[in-house]
């Protein structure tokens, strides 16, 4: 079984982001970049399925500028077999990404596509669902457990009311949640091996996809800074502040 894992390059979760002076976007100049944490979980799950004998090959794919090859190499150091880089300098919306991934899937014919449920930069949580619609493949989102048995996959997913279990035929699409697994650290030997693993580069034109965005960013602004909390010495002092300063009672 072949598994395809789309991944994304994002600003490291521990870095404080800055907004450009013209409020057009986030300024990523000289910021540390990383593999999206949810994508890392997706890669880990795919690698575990290969290690258990369920899968035979794990392919990672990413869309973006040349710099995303760093994260593709990271994914291969974690255990992916090869990578595909769809090179473009354009900022693409989730639907455009899904269309490109559909073209990749038509070439690769993967039996399972595993996404992180969302990226930590846009938090859109859309690409996996859109790809499922475009390919007419069954989908299960927010997975906390994945089991493959022959040509069927059983997914336990987290929902507002608790847990839901879905059983679907392959090929299928799964988006994964934080509690699915704990990603491994890449060892130095595997980091070195990843440099020699195949990484195919293609363009949007190579895939025969015409992209048109239907979204325009009007402005980007930083969140309003919250006032620091204060400690009070007694219930009476708390009530006084709620009444006279916050005026909520």
Image: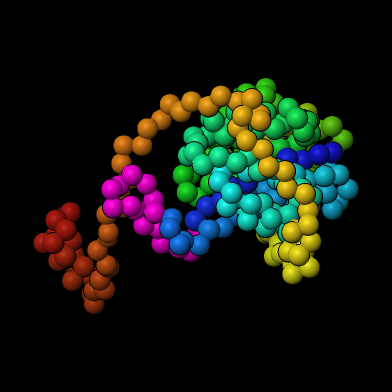
Whole-percent x, y for residue 95 in the image: 53, 30
Is residue 216 left or right of 188 when viewed as pictured? left
Is residue 104 left or right of 225 when viewed as pictured? right
The reply to whether residue 199 is visible in this rendering is: yes
Q: How many marks?
A: 0
* Residue 210 falls within the magenta-colored stretch: no
Is residue 241 left or right of 81 when viewed as pictured? left
* Magenta segment, prevailing SS (helix, strand or loop): loop
Decide which of 25, 163 is in the foreground and name it.
Answer: 25
What residue appears at the point 83 percent right and 49 percent down from the top-left corner? 50
Is residue 236 left or right of 41 when viewed as pictured? left
Q: Which residues are magenta?
A: 12-27
Whole-percent x, y for residue 148 in the image: 81, 40
Q: Quadrant of residue 6?
A: top right
Decide which of 211, 121 is in the foreground and name it.
Answer: 211
Decide which of 87, 225 is in the foreground and name it.
Answer: 87
* Residue 13 falls within the magenta-colored stretch: yes
The image's colour scheme reads rainbow
Whole-percent x, y for residue 200 in the image: 72, 43
What residue appears at the point 84 percent right and 53 percent down from the top-left corner? 51
Whole-percent x, y for residue 136 in the image: 67, 22
In the rendered image, the vertical position of residue 104 relative to residue 68, given as above or below? above
């Amino acid at each position: 079984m072949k598994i395809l894992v789309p991944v994304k390059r994002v600003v490291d979760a521990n870095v404080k982001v800055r907004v450009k002076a013209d409020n057009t976007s986030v300024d990523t100049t000289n910021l540390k970049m990383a593999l999206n944490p949810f994508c890392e979980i997706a890669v880990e799950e795919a690698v575990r399925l290969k290690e258990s004998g369920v899968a035979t090959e794990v392919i990672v794919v990413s869309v973006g500028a040349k710099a995303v090859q760093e994260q593709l190499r990271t994914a291969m150091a974690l255990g992916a077999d090869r990578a595909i880089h769809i090179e473009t300098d354009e900022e693409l919306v989730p639907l455009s990404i899904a269309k490109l991934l559909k073209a990749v899937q038509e070439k690769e014919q993967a039996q399972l596509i595993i996404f992180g449920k969302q990226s930590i930069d846009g938090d859109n949580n859309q690409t996996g669902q859109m790809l499922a619609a475009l390919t007419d493949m069954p989908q299960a989102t927010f997975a906390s457990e994945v089991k493959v048995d022959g040509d069927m996959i059983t997914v336990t997913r987290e929902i507002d009311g608790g847990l839901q279990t879905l059983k679907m035929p392959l090929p299928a699409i799964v988006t994964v949640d934080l509690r699915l697994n704990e990603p491994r650290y890449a060892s130095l030997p595997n980091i070195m091996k990843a440099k020699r693993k195949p990484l195919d580069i293609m363009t949007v034109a190579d895939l025969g996809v015409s992209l048109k965005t239907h979204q325009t960013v009007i402005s980007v602004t930083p969140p309003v800074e919250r006032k620091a909390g204060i400690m009070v010495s007694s219930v009476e002092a708390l009530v006084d502040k709620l009444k006279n300063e916050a005026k909520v009672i």
